[in-house]
Image (tube, grey):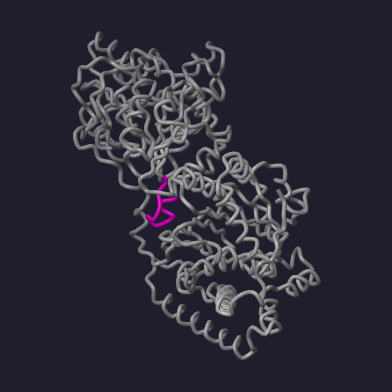
Amino acid sequence: MLKKVEKKYSVKSTPKAMLKKWYELMTLGRLLDERAPNYLKQAIGWSYHAPYAGHDGIQLAIGQTFTKGLDHLFPYYRDMLTAVSAGLTAEEIILNGISKATDLASGGRHMSNHFAKPAWNIHNVSSCTGNHTLHAVGVARAMKRYKHTGVAISSQGESSVSEGYCYEAINGASNEKLPVIFVFQDNGYGISVPKRDQTANERVADNFSGFANLRIIHCDGKDVFDSMSAMDEARKHAIEKQEPVIVHADCVRIGAHSNSDKHEWYRDDKEIAEAKAQDPYPRFRKELIEGKAFSEKELVAIEEDMKKVVLDAHMKAMKAPNPDPASIFDFVIPPSHIPEKFKDGTHTDSSEPVKFIDAINGALKAEFRHNPNTFIWGQDMANKEKGGIFNVSKGMQQEFGIERVFNGPIAEDYILGTANGFSRFRKDIRVVVEGAEFADYFWPAMEQYIEMSHDYWRSNGAFSANVLIRLASGGYIGGGLYHSQNLEGSLATIPGVRIVCPAFADDAAGLIRTAMRSEGPTLYLEPKSLYNSKQAMTSIPEDFEVPFGKARVRRAGKDLTVISYGNTIHMCLEAAEKLATEGFDVEVVDLRSIVPLDEEAIVNSIKKTNRCLIVHEDKVFGGFGGELVALINEKAFEHLDAPVKRIGSPYTPVGFNRILERAILPDTEKIYQGMISLLRY
């Protein structure tokens, strides 16, 4: 639905006190905007600055519409006036610009011009432009679930809407009818790329004109009164109708894209002059005088007051401390839940053995009963008797309802990005997502995975995404490409996410429970060939928990250490038993947790056996085993009587035909031969 709303604001109809406030904010913002480049020239900081001049009307309106305590605001890097209008002080803006330790957004960890105030739900967003649309949709979903009166506001430039996750966000918000406002600040350029190279429609909002349950409002983003009217109507509509609104604001970019951009290379003098002639700030000033709301003397007095505010803010910010180099390890990942009863993640329970798949299902249900603020969604997650592609979540929607257990679209970015946003609404919320039907299909969500990985560090400990990402991984099912992949070797290089891979039913349940009681993200890899495997069946004590970073010795021995996890643990145990009949005593260490890693258990085992074989299903080249070899060489080299050897897949994709699969994936015989070669070295 497209509609240009009537102006409810004008110089005549707006109280003088409100006009004064608006002019103070616009003056303060413009002074900061123009001052920012000077810090770089003086080598003080603010090495990235995207000037907002030309966006004044819509940015003032976004900030004024934002309601502290009710709304969540996701500004983008050009939103300086939006941040000022929403309540950030001049000092807070400068602290961010010059990357001081007391910067509210990130403590100097994130790029300048990324403004935030987490205590007010003005969120720290990344430099990946437009990706916060998914977070806004996620928090709007939480608002709807918790019957909260408020809106999520996502602000961005028009060119970022070309990103696929923006389409996923708007599609999902319209489908779910969520109270979110998407503001497109259209200045005609994506850095140097003109709008005509982005989309066929003159206005990008028109790309969404066919979406149901979506209101589209056009406004002049250079006009304060038109922008205020549009944002007021957008918030009112989003709350009353419980559906999303796009506000498309026509702006003008007066300066370059940023301080590293030379717009003279792609804009001629005439175009730049025309842009300056449309400057909203002097236009608003002129309206105030011509409408007899203020005299020239009164406006000059306001301007002088704002200059004093900026100077005072500058003096204070310059005295603020710089970040401490020793702090780089703070807030990489939130503290994990520490099991009290099962401190080492082992037990002596002898109850009836449980299947791996039932262990996961049972632990999920138990945690959903334990914490009513727990949710799960993904593809094929809940439709009648269906509970995920492998039926791991069977029965959950029937017990916990569609409000807590529901399907997501086939859009992995959307599934993970909205989980990030949803968990921003309350700290006691825990979200479980089936990140993709198979681990191999997770790659479209990688941008959101990266985002989630550094949320906690980037925000200086202010926010962590409390999300458990479940992925059915690995081969041995005849799946071939896109159904047999292992991700841990690639993803372990990214700090900020715990990665676990259980091989037995008890560990499957215990790691689920620990992850769901911890803060921060956890990637939970489920070797799908073990779901119904007899080898993976174990007894499970009630409320069993497995601590992160704690390996488990599955078979004690003195002649050789074998380190593995996931599917190949069982093959290692088979090979070790075979060697026992030949007089060799092999120790098998199940890592269980890849990040964090139990370095102590690895080193202690090698001290005892003096030999080490590393086995994993993934490719040897670039696999996680290489990291283990490096660790052993660094911390246990003097205890080795033989070189560390690795067994894994060759450097090829996994073939579909079972003959090809067997040729590629490790098996008991290949592992046995690797053990023999080391034992005889």
Image quadrant holding the C terminus, namely: top left
Camera-nearest residue between 604 and 371: 371
Residue 80: where, in percent of width, then height?
56, 67
Name which quarter of the figure residue 676 lies in: top left
How many marks do you count on the picture? 0
Does residue 622 appear in the picture of this structure? Answer: no
Camera-nearest residue between 269 and 419: 419
Apparent side of residue 527 relative to residue 37 in the rendered image (left or right): left
Residue 464, magenta (yes or no): yes
Apparent side of residue 270 relative to residue 324 in the rendered image (left or right): right
For residue 10, above or below residue 439: below
Q: Residue at x 46, y 26 (%)?
A: 473
Residue extent of the magenta highlight: 455-465
Apparent side of residue 385 relative to residue 180 in the rendered image (left or right): left
Camera-nearest residue between 178 and 333: 178
Residue 420: where, in percent of width, then height?
47, 45
Residue 265: where, in percent of width, then height?
74, 65
Q: Residue at x 57, y 66 (%)?
A: 49
Majority secondary structure in the magenta region? loop
For residue 616, above or below residue 21: above
Residue 442: where, in percent of width, then height?
53, 33
For residue 89, above or below residue 368: below
Residue 604, magenta (yes or no): no
Q: Residue furthest top?
A: 581
Does residue 356 appear in the picture of this structure? Answer: yes
Q: Residue furthest bottom?
A: 297
Q: Residue furthest right?
A: 270
